[in-house]
Image (tube, rainbow, N blue to C red):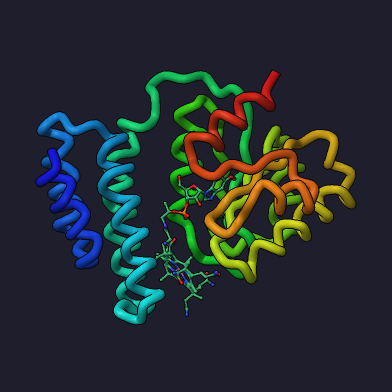
């Protein structure tokens, strides 16, 4: 298994989308679990990409091709990560906040929540407070899930919460936040209902909001 995981890891570092798809597919066929591929292959590779970027060895284009390779691997894992034939237990509106284009973590949270039985309305990235509010109203969402990867955009989460409050919707939705720069304390300060450090915990926490 280690050799297969190592190849997946390398394909992301190389930003090689085809190689990533091939090695993920081969690992799945060899019986490596989707969870192991994700946690030992895809996620550590992106962490390494971040480290190389910080050290000036990688630049934005390298990050971008690595992210595309990872997303292609994630797409192959999606069906395995989502339990089949689950009835929707509630509706989640999810998005990455305004100014922020990072979507891999958000996509993972959406996959895990879908796997936990939620219906997902994915607004994508760079989502404004108005878009969140309108969609919550229109879709009668139970949960708003926001992701941010930049210290400069995480503060936009409080604008969304404020807009939800001003629209008179605060009592009808639970607000869940996450993303690498966030902390439990930050979530408390901005008035979110919950914070989760990873996608699995986000899905578990979301389930506790549904009675
Ligand atoms: Co960007 N980037 N990036 N980037 N990027 C980071 C975040 C950075 C830490 C890199 C670094 O310096 N080491 C840094 C942020 C520094 C900071 O703010 N403190 C950074 C920067 C600076 C930038 C730009 C400003 C670079 C530039 O242009 N000079 C720029 C900003 C663009 C913008 O958004 N406006 C930028 C651009 C990009 C790309 C477009 C090239 C690409 C994103 C492509 C994409 O997402 N489609 C990219 C990438 C790939 C990264 C890194 C390398 C990887 C992010 C990732 O996908 N990780 C990242 C460094 C790193 O994280 N190591 C970096 C894998 C993913 C599974 O993890 O998203 O953390 P993550 O999700 C986790 C948890 O956080 C959590 O669950 C997931 C795991 O289960 N989680 C939630 C996430 N959302 C959640 C929501 C929840 C609960 C949990 O509840 C709702």
Please give the count of numbered marks on the rendered protein: 0
Is 86 on the left-hand or right-hand side of 146?
Answer: left
Which one is in front, 157 or 139? 157
Residue at 18% across, 33% down: 32
Which one is in front, 185 or 69? 185
Which quarter of the picture shows residue 176?
top right
Which quarter of the picture shows residue 124?
bottom right
Locate residue 70, reporting x and y percent.
30, 55
Residue at 15% across, 29% down: 31
The answer to whether residue 138 is seen in the rendering is: no
Residue at 32% across, 53% down: 44
- Whether residue 73 is situated above or below residue 30 in the rendered picture: below
- Whether residue 42 is situated above or below residue 90 in the rendered picture: below
Is 1 on the left-hand or right-hand side of 202?
Answer: left
- Whether residue 44 is situated above or below residue 58 in the rendered picture: above
Locate residue 149, reporting x and y percent.
54, 61
The answer to whether residue 199 is seen in the rendering is: yes
Locate residue 131, reporting x and y percent.
70, 56
Which quarter of the picture shows residue 59?
bottom left
Q: Quadrant of the C terminus?
A: top right
Locate residue 160, reporting x and y percent.
75, 55
Is 102 on the left-hand or right-hand side of 22?
Answer: right
Q: Quadrant of the N terminus?
A: top left
Residue at 64% across, 71% down: 152
């Amino acid at each position: 298994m280690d050799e297969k995981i190592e190849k997946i890891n390398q394909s992301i570092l190389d930003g090689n989308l085809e190689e990533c798809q091939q090695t993920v597919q081969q690992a799945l066929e060899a019986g490596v679990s989707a969870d192991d591929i994700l946690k030992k292959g895809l996620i550590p590779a992106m962490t390494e990409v971040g480290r190389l970027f910080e050290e000036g060895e990688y630049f934005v284009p390298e990050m971008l091709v690595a992210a595309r390779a990872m997303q292609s691997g994630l797409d192959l894992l999606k069906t395995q990560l989502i339990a089949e034939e689950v009835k929707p237990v509630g509706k989640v509106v999810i998005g990455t906040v305004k100014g922020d284009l990072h979507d891999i973590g958000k996509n993972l949270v959406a996959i895990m929540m879908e796997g936990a039985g939620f219906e997902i309305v994915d607004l994508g990235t760079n989502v404004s407070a108005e878009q969140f509010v309108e969609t919550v109203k229109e879709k009668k969402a139970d949960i708003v899930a926001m992701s941010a990867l930049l210290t400069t955009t995480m503060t936009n989460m409080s604008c969304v919460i404020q807009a939800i409050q001003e629209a008179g919707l605060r009592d009808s939705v639970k607000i869940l936040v996450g993303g690498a720069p966030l902390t439990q304390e930050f979530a408390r300060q901005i008035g979110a209902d919950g914070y989760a450090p990873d996608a699995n915990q986000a899905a578990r926490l979301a389930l506790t909001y549904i009675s």
